[in-house]
Image (spheres, rainbow, N blue to C red):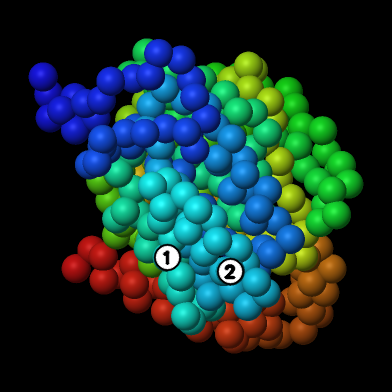
């Protein structure tokens, strides 16, 4: 029996049972850890937690919630659920907002994740299928070559109006390890169940890259492939003004994408996978170009044709001094990695 077998040594239930009705011996290590990050989701967090609690499994589950100093009543709701289900829910309550300080909330939950598999659902999204975790865990148990599985998701607005019937659409298929590494896998965040694998250098970059979910999924391609479930009902992604991603304008989404691609380029270059590194270098260039509007480019092109301007001044005028300083500080971090 391997160390992993011993760690997750429990007797599965004869049939799936709602996790609120589970009774496991003290010290039982969960097979699945659910990770939830929330901030000012008072109108949404109940949906997320109820989606966790309705799961029916034959294996133990834990729910880890990070509340980033919410000010709207979210904290009180999480505390109420934790008090009712202390055997399932463990929460971290920040007294100061960590995201605003540049700290990623996920880093506080990462050391607490005990599951062989990790599921992710933000506090403003939710699951709709009570068999979700069972189906995904069963598949990953039977397919050791697979490191992540997912399914489709719908999109709604803040009051529940349907905006999109499918995020995945025609991309509903399995993905090879190489496709994962190239970022081709379309697996909505709230749909994922992931093997608890730490890519060898990912934490060296965790203070720099912005698109943490994308970075994690891409680097999982070093360890295996991905499976898409057509047998699981879609999760729900809520698009609203308070969302970290949906609240961004297109420019900042492009800047975030470019930032992530840049550090994926560095990651794979350091790993020695030069083909994948080149792919992300090209992607970085495309996204960086998309961060500058066509109107701005046209104005600057005309200026450079008819006026004599210093190239450095042109760069500063397009990107902005604050962004230049941000990139400079980022560069200092990167240089430090290799010293």
Density class for disc 2 (Cα within 10 Å; few <14, some 14-19, many ≥20) is few
Quadrant where the N terminus is found in the figure? top left
State the image quarter where residue 27 is shown: top left
In the image, residue 141 above or below residue 238:
above
Q: Nearer the viewer, residue 211 or 24?
A: 24
Q: Is residue 216 visible?
A: no
Residue at 34 percent of width and 67 percent of height: 334
Query: Badge 1 is on which residue?
Result: 92
x and y, in percent, of residue 307 in the image: 77, 84
Residue at 48 percent of width and 81 percent of height: 96
Query: Badge 2 is on which residue?
Result: 76
Residue at 64 percent of width and 82 percent of height: 320
Q: Secondary structure at mark 1?
A: strand
* Mark number, residue 58: none
Quadrant where the C terminus is found in the figure? bottom left
Q: Nearer the viewer, residue 190 or 7?
A: 7
User: Which is in the foreground here, disc 2 or disc 1?
Assistant: 2
x and y, in percent, of residue 309 in the image: 68, 85
x and y, in percent, of residue 9 in the image: 21, 26
| 250 sits left or right of 180 in the view | right
Residue at 74 percent of width and 61 percent of height: 43
Density class for disc 1 (Cα within 10 Å; few <14, some 14-19, many ≥20) is some
Q: CA distance from mark 2 to mark 1?
A: 12 Å
State the image quarter where residue 243 is shown: bottom right
x and y, in percent, of residue 121 in the image: 56, 46
Q: Nearer the viewer, residue 1 or 196?
A: 1
């Amino acid at each position: 029996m391997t160390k992993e077998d011993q760690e997750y040594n429990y007797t599965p239930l004869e049939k799936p049972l709602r996790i609120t009705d589970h009774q496991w011996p003290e010290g039982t290590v969960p097979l699945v850890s659910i990770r939830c990050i929330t901030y000012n989701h008072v109108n949404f967090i109940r949906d997320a937690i109820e989606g966790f609690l309705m799961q029916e499994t034959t294996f133990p589950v834990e729910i880890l919630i990070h509340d980033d100093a919410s000010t709207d009543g979210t904290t009180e709701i999480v505390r109420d659920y934790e008090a009712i289900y202390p055997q399932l829910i463990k929460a971290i309550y920040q007294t100061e907002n960590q995201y605003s300080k540049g700290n990623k909330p996920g880093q506080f939950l990462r050391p607490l994740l005990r599951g062989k598999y990790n599921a992710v659902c933000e506090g403003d999204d939710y699951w709709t299928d009570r068999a979700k975790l069972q189906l995904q865990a069963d598949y990953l148990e039977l397919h050791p070559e697979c490191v992540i599985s997912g399914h489709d998701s719908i999109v709604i607005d803040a009051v529940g109006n349907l905006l999109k019937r499918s995020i995945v659409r025609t991309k509903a298929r399995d993905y090879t390890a190489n496709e994962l590494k190239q970022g081709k896998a379309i697996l909505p965040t709230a749909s994922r169940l992931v093997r608890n694998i730490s890519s060898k250098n990912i934490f060296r970059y965790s203070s720099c890259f912005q698109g943490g979910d994308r970075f994690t999924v891409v680097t999982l391609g070093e360890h295996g492939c991905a499976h898409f479930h057509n047998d699981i009902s879609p999760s729900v992604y809520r698009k609203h003004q308070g969302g970290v991603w949906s609240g961004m304008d297109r420019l900042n989404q492009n800047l975030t994408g470019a930032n992530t691609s840049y550090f994926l380029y560095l990651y794979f270059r350091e790993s020695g996978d030069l083909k994948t590194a080149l792919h992300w270098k090209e992607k970085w260039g495309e996204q960086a170009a998309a961060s500058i509007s066509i109107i701005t480019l046209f104005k600057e092109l005309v200026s450079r044709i008819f006026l004599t301007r210093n190239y450095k001044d042109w760069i500063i005028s397009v990107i902005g001094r604050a962004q230049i300083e941000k990139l400079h500080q980022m560069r200092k971090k990167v240089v430090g990695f290799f010293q």
